Amino acid sequence: MQTKYMSLDEFTIQQLRMVPGGTGELSRLLRDIGLASKRINVEVNKAGLQDILGDMGVKNVQGEEVKKLDDFANNQLIYVLKNGMSCAGICSEEEENIQIFDDELSNKSKYVVLFDPLDGSSNIDTNISIGTIFSIFRRVTELGKPCTIEDFLQPGSQQIAAGYIVYGSSTMLVYATRLGVNGFTLDPPIGEYCLSHPDIQCPADGKIFSVNGGYYRQYDQGVQKYIDLLQNKTKADGGPLTQRFTGSMVADLHRTLIKGGIFMYPLTTDNPKGKLRLMYECNPFGYITEMAGGKAESGSGKILDIHPTSLHQRTPIFIGSKNMVEECLSYVSS
Ligand code: AHG
Ligand code: MN
Ligand code: MN
Ligand code: MN
């Protein structure tokens, strides 16, 4: 029997053959993250039937209410990465500090992983697509010793891989390395991610823009002018455009990657440093989008060039189709 779709494992092994001296550690790491995401997917699919909806009754380091599914997803990811042998430590949107695994195998691992265990979690209770986002860096400290904060506070341009899982009408895992961006759809009967979207390229132009229009009056003048421009495009200049904003960055950026468009989360008066987190949201999506030919900017430079000074720092972001982001920068650059 001929197998039509290559599984994630088969694909990463095939890619390994293209990298001289590859050890397979990254393949194992992706498999571990894939496993955690399948467990999260099962719970997300049962949400509503079990007592997994709603709040934990505590706030996280970001000052947000922690949902039960945020906590479940966070624990699953930590569990698989700690029990695997390809990760020296993690950092999560839901944890105040890094977790250093510090055992003999983990200390020998080349990689650290940062993640947003559940993105768009305010949408859980209403059955809108949500996701998981991850970012992988090669350690800069000595192998054989426990990892340190230095391994995590690297600019996004140093990422080795980044990806996301979208728990949507189907469940997909998309990841990027310098070899390209590939998408895998979960085939439920066999429980495997199978290559369904090879070599994803973000179209250079698009017809959709994604921004929370409810905050319009909180944006600065340049952003307001750019939104006005988008809303007033006529047929002659490529319009009219469509506006879409789900409140799940993963869902909005998955669409932007496939169909083209621009996603913006600018500064607001309520969030004067931006809302989205550099390490768990903007860096991984910046890397994925740029590897797919798109662009990711903060308004004062490239997202991937930001040198982080703290784990939970935030940044404004303008990301998506190259030409749209370039046009946007002529209005919003500082
Ligand atoms: P998270 O659920 O991981 O905290 O992230 C939510 C983020 C992001 O996914 C989304 O684009 C944004 O928050 C929406 O925020 P607003 O509702 O303020 O627009
Ligand atoms: Mn959150
Ligand atoms: Mn998020
Ligand atoms: Mn989250």
Image (cartoon, helix red, strand yellow):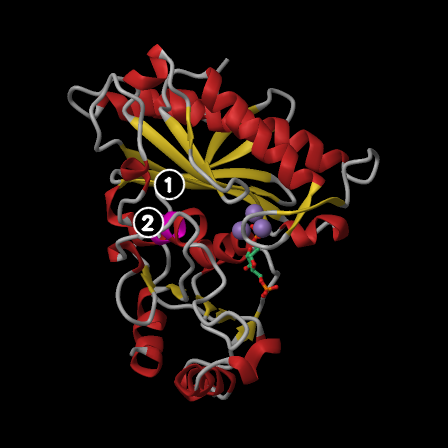
Q: Which residue is disc 2 drawn over?
A: 287
Give the label on residue 162, or none.
Answer: 1
Q: Would you place residue 209 above or below residue 260 in this image?
A: below
In the rendered view, does 301 fall on the left or right side of 54?
A: left
Q: Is residue 100 visible?
A: yes
The three-letter code of the residue at mark 2 reads Tyr
Does 3 sit above or below residue 124? above
What residue do we see at 68% from left, 29% from top? Answer: 42
Q: Residue sitting at 57 percent across and 71 percent down?
A: 212
Residue 70 found in image quarter = top right
Q: Nearer the viewer, residue 13 or 267?
A: 267
Residue 4 can be seen, yes or no: no
The tag earlier along the polypeptide, 2 or 1, is 1
Question: x, y percentage for residue 206?
Answer: 43, 68
Q: How dense is the environment of label 1, judged by Cα within 10 Å: few (below 14), some, or many (20 and up)?
A: many
Q: Which residues are magenta?
A: 283-288
| Left/right of residue 79 with respect to residue 188 in the rendered view | left
